[in-house]
Image: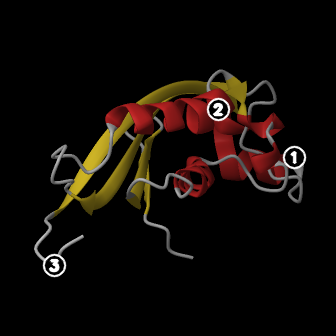
Amino acid sequence: MSAGTPIAHFGRRYHFSASHRLHCGELSAERNREVFGKCNNPFGHGHNYVVEVLLAGPIDAATGMVTNLADLDAFAGQELLARFDHQNLNLLPEFASQVSTTENLAVEIWKLFQGYRHATLKKVRVEETGNNSFEYFGER
């Protein structure tokens, strides 16, 4: 990359459906109901999640792109959609020791997309509902 190579940001959205139950094993049943309300339903509930990843990188002089869309979609299909689509999040290893909140889901998705080597991950945004969305920038 030469010193004058422009850096661009590229956002891509993915959709998946999954269920979960917000429940903390360290809390009593009563406290779980107080904290999580109807989201503590023992039978769970589902969402149609929208995930947006924001990537950055130099614009390739030959292709004019930050990253090849086909490469990104293949990565997302294998790492994101195959893992989470039509799943009960509570049954996945990622949530064996943490509550399956969308905040925690955003962090787990960040971890997945850090494995994408063709651009630098800048942000993960997860829309849970039309009113609720969560963003994660990789801070610890």
Q: Quadrant of the N terminus?
A: bottom left
**Nearer the observer, 20 or 62:** 62
| Residue 59 in the image, given as x and y percentages of width and height | 19, 56
The kind of residue tagged 2 is Phe
78 to 116, vertically: above or below: above
Per the image, label 2 sits on a secondary structure element best described as: helix
As drawn, the label of residue 46 is: none
Residue at point 64%, 28% (across, down): 82
For label 1, the residue is 29
For label 2, the residue is 84
**Mark 1, mark 3: which one is toward the viewer?**
3
Query: In the image, is 82 to the left or to the right of 25?
Result: left
For label 3, the residue is 3
Query: In the image, is 98 to the left or to the right of 37?
Result: right
**Nearer the observer, 70 or 20:** 70
| Residue 74 in the image, given as x and y percentages of width and height | 49, 31
Per the image, label 3 sits on a secondary structure element best described as: loop
Q: Residues within 10 Å of mark 3 (few under 14, many from 20)?
A: few
Q: Earlier in the sequence, mark 1 or mark 3?
A: 3
128 to 32, vertically: above or below: above
Q: Is residue 130 visible?
A: no
**Mark 3, mark 2: which one is toward the viewer?**
3
